[in-house]
Image (spheres, helix red, strand yellow):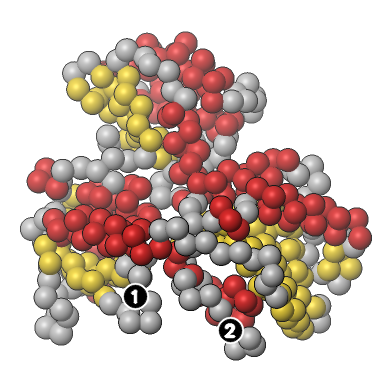
């Protein structure tokens, strides 16, 4: 699993579906198998063919490949830690046909810690020199905030040691657990004033215990936004234009925010078709249609809460708090494709258990 490649754009658009991709792959798989088996010209004879075809499906995929055993090539598809692309990687692998000599894997799998050692710029990262402790925050009891301690840490090489520690965790925990189970990570050296250190080999069990506790605490939690009140906020920007936000302030007062820890952020850009940064009537109809389509797919009773919207400076931003990240990724991407000829839609999904990214509205309500 030593090879990592970002997909590059292709000129032809022959691949319109997962099935198209796998049909193309099956025609090439014997040559690809020989290339990986020989460990020769992998970039030219494998990556440079595979990458453009995958990019025709969707940008943002990465992959790793190597021999799983003497007779099997493993091809691991990964979003390289990008939350909003996880579901597409999983869907691609789910549709993969059974091909003798090939093993297809969605997301980088966990590696046994006993055989795991990372070398980077003269530093080693393994179970002998990595430890951790948990930082508890009474005001945010469900937050999983971890400090990693590397025994060879020094400020001069902080960036290298931090990157190496993250790569170690990505391999030790597996990609999915690494990007979804930890809310905050800090890397530092040993100090006399930190809590007792825990061997890094116990981190996996710690995270699973915390995740089990979290699920049990919020299982079945629902919120009905039907009777909520929305508050209008208005500000004047440095440009002289107005910024207007309509936020569900009843929802922002909810004491179970952590049950919906994933924030979907949609930005609808309407540059060049606005008055003083605000949408004209034609654009407003499109923005309204997109928002209604989003709410139709992401219903509060199913775990997707509409926090509100913000409009100004040639963009409208929509915010949803979600119980999971997979369906919002699919919905946002499909809307992006559906309205591509009318408006530019960008989106992101990030974890914010206590919705701290909306603290700017707290003083007012």
Extreme-right residue of the structure: 281
On the picture, is 349 further left or further right than 72? Answer: right
Across and down, in percent, residue 226 comes to 68, 65
Q: Which mark is residue 347?
A: none
User: Is residue 195 something that shows in the picture?
Assistant: yes
User: Is residue 165 something that shows in the picture?
Assistant: no
Across and down, in percent, residue 144 comes to 32, 67
Viewer-nearest residue: 222 or 158: 222
The quadrant where residue 353 appears: bottom left
**Residue at point 28% right, 77% down?**
136
Report which residue position mark 2 lands on: 362
Q: Earlier in the sequence, mark 2 or mark 1?
A: 1
Q: Residues within 10 Å of mark 1 (few under 14, many from 20)?
A: few
On the picture, is 48 further left or further right than 266? Answer: left
Extreme-bottom residue of the structure: 363
Which part of the image, by quadrant, shows the C terminus?
A: bottom right
**Residue at point 27% right, 36% down?**
2
CA separation in Å, label 2 and label 1: 20 Å
Across and down, in percent, residue 236 comes to 77, 83
On the picture, is 141 further left or further right than 54? Answer: left
Viewer-nearest residue: 349 or 65: 349
Q: Secondary structure at mark 1?
A: loop
The quadrant where residue 5 appears: top left
Viewer-nearest residue: 108 or 252: 252
Across and down, in percent, residue 338 comes to 73, 40
Viewer-nearest residue: 159 or 357: 357
Report which residue position mark 1 lands on: 141
Q: Residues within 10 Å of mark 2 (few under 14, many from 20)?
A: few
**Residue at point 32% right, 41% down?**
108
**Residue at point 52% right, 61% down?**
222
């Amino acid at each position: 699993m030593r090879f990592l490649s970002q997909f590059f754009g292709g000129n032809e658009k022959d691949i319109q579906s997962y099935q198209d991709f796998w049909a193309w792959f099956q025609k090439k798989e014997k040559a690809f198998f020989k290339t990986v088996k020989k460990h020769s010209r992998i970039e030219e004879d494998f990556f440079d063919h595979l990458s453009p075809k995958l990019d025709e499906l969707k940008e943002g995929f990465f992959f790793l490949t190597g021999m799983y055993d003497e007779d099997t090539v493993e091809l691991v598809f990964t979003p390289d830690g990008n939350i909003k692309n996880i579901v597409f990687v999983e869907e691609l692998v789910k549709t993969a046909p059974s091909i003798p000599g090939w093993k297809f894997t969605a997301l980088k799998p966990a590696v046994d810690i006993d055989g795991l050692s990372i070398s980077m710029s003269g530093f080693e990262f393994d179970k002998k020199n990595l430890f951790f402790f948990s930082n508890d925050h009474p005001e945010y009891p469900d937050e999983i905030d971890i400090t990693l301690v590397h025994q060879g840490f020094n400020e001069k090489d902080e960036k290298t040691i931090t990157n190496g520690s993250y790569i170690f965790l990505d391999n030790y925990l597996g990609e999915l657990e690494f990007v979804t189970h930890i809310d905050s990570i800090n890397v530092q050296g040993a100090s006399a004033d930190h809590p007792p250190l825990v061997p890094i080999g116990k981190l996996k069990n710690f995270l699973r215990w915390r995740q089990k506790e979290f699920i049990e605490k919020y299982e079945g939690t629902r919120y009905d936004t039907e009777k909520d009140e929305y508050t209008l906020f208005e500000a004047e920007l440095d440009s002289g234009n107005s910024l207007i936000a309509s936020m569900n302030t009843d929802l922002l007062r909810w004491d179970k925010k952590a049950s919906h820890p994933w924030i979907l952020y949609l930005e609808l850009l309407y540059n060049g078709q606005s008055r003083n940064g605000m949408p004209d009537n034609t654009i407003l109809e499109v923005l309204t249609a997109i928002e209604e389509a989003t709410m139709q797919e992401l219903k509060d009773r199913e775990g997707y809460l509409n926090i509100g919207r913000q409009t100004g400076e040639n963009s409208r931003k929509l915010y949803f708090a979600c119980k999971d990240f997979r369906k919002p990724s699919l919905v946002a991407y499909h809307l992006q494709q559906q309205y591509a000829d009318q408006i530019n839609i960008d989106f992101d999904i990030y974890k914010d258990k206590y919705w701290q990214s909306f603290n700017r509205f707290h003083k007012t309500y």
